[in-house]
Amino acid sequence: MSGPNNGVMVVLEATAGRLSDVSLELISLGKDVANSLGGPLVGVLIGASDVALTAVGCDIVDCYVDFGTIGYSSEMAVTALSARVEAIRPRLLLAPTGTLGLDLCSALSVAFDATLASYVVGLSVDAGRIQATSQLYGGKLLADCDLGDGFAIACVVPGSAVALQLGVGDVEVSNHSLDAIVGSLAIEPGIRHEPEASGVDIVAAELLVSVGRGIGASANLEVVQELADALGVPMSASRPVIDQGWLPKPHQVGKSGKKVKPKVYLSFGISGAPEHLEGMRQSEVIIACNTDPNAPIFKVAHYGTTLDLFDLVPELVELVEG
Amino acid sequence: MNIIVAMRQLADLVEELEVDSSGTDIDREFVKFVSNEWDEAALEEALCLKEAYGGTVTVVGIEEVDFHQTLHAALAKGADRAVELTGDFEGWIPTRQRAAALAWFIRECDFDLVLTGVQAADDLNGQLAGAIGAMLGVAHASVVTNISVEGSEAHITQELGGGVTSVSRARLPLVLGVQSARQAPRYVPISRIRQVMAEATIEKVPVTGESFGNTPQVLRLYAPEASGTATMLEGKPKEVASAIYDVLVAKGVAGSRKGN
């Protein structure tokens, strides 16, 4: 096994003929690092075959184009990526934080003894060493770390870079089949299920009243529900509320839920973990109520209050009901 | 059906976290450590699987502050065996080191499934499931929200984001990073935990010198600069409510329904 070259490999995903936003962000981050290292930027596309590959901004694109039709398998992804890493020996691999990135990064770091950093929000090169900034403890702390001078992997948080504006350029595209891999998998490619249609449509709502862990208990939901009812708008929630079974899945905002952009996002007891912010930061106006003045949500909110929601919400209900 | 659940402690995120004098770790002295919430989901799913298919649940983790509380609670909830791996575990333990110790223990066990939390808020060095899977040479999957078993096969549901899920048929054994269990983690009364503390034993297994490879070197740990643009609304609840209501009216999302 030879040592790594100076290339940067980015794991790309595409749906409906276009690269995902986070893929374009990874290309943007990867291109800067590749320029600093003086190596090529190699994209490995996992997904549909109808993407305009001349425009991805990479020097080389390796495609596994069958994933979209075969279905997803974590083991297939790891096996396919391992083969490309083995063949290309990049200096740095970038993957998006999400199911694909979580499935890939730890396993590849063990297989190739690569230095892995998760939750990466920034990357730089200093005297040939790759350095990363990671967002930890639900966004409360940042860590600058040195990933050394060998093969490194960064699992990057979506929204960490400006998506590269793509121009048409020369790109060397090679296609790889998954046929040889599929036959021997312990985890077979899965059957995709779109989210169930439900009565609630939090994406279409102009105002959302959203609750998080700070609500404390299921019974306390009634307090906020009363406000949502008075306003005639749906309730949404962050992951802990959904995982506890206090509200059904279609109400979830965030990475594993829905992305929302209402005119006003009014949140109670949501601290603002990066996965949640990803789903609501595009809202026109964000109003956050959280008793912790250091809660990360105040970094994206336009208006904030540290009042106890149980004191505040009844007052709001009174105003709304006139 | 033999299930191993890898659990761990984590600084309680509800508390304020301070950076210690080295500038590269949190101050561990005064912070409270609690069980990683995703590990609790993994335990719950394991207990549900045991109830459905029989077998055993073994809970294992490395020696950490208050880990006995987590183990005792797991036994009280229905786990059969609690194991604490002892050794040179200090401070902020990289995922690779944790995974190496766990894989060393698990390798000697008879298991069908290894379940652990999908992530932890300080796992800078990657998530546990993929690392354990790679070390054991066992297939793994993350962000798992449902598991059902039929003979030597399982059906696993993974979230792919945006509400899309993928259901795969898979051959046991597997290592799975659990996002959520089929039900919220069960409650166990403190009296039951006390009873377990008096009766049950935690097995201590020493781990020595497992090599774990390259990990990132933390240069600096710090709170992000307050880039916040939030205008803090001060005053009594009535005044703050009024200010919020004014914003809702100005954006045209409240007010028109008044009197309905």
Image: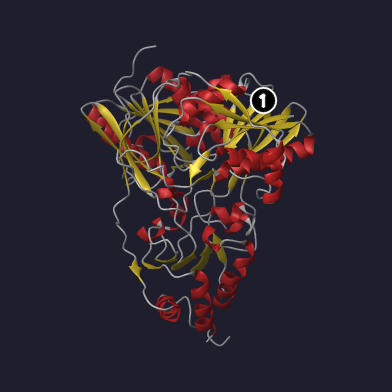
* Side of A154 relative to A180 (left or right): left
Which residue of the protein is positioned furthest toward the front in this rendering? Answer: B198
Q: Nearer the viewer, residue A50 or A275?
A: A275
What residue appears at the point 35 percent right and 69 percent down from the top-left corner?
B232
Q: Residue at x 54, y 52 (%)?
A: A257
The reply, left or right, for residue A133 in relation to residue A20 is left
Residue A164 in percent (x, y) is at 32, 43
Instruction: Answer with left or right where residue A103 lies relative to residue B114.
Output: left
Q: Position of residue A245 (x, y in %)?
A: 64, 55
* Label tally: 1
Say which quarter of the image contains residue A91: top left
Residue B174, image x and y in percent? 64, 28
Quadrant hosting residue A170: top left
Residue A224 visible? The answer is: yes
Answer above or below: position of B241 versus B208.
below
Residue A57 is situated, as x and y percent measured from the top left of the image, at 32, 36
- The chain letter for the residue carrying disc 1 is B
Q: Amino acid at mark 1?
A: Pro
Where residue B200 sits, quadrant-wise, is: top right
Can residue A192 be seen here? The reply is no
Q: Looking at this rendering, what residue extends furthest in the top direction?
A: A1
Question: Which of these two is toward me, A44 or B175?
Answer: B175
Where does label 1 land, which residue? B173
Image quadrant holding the N terminus of chain A, namely top left
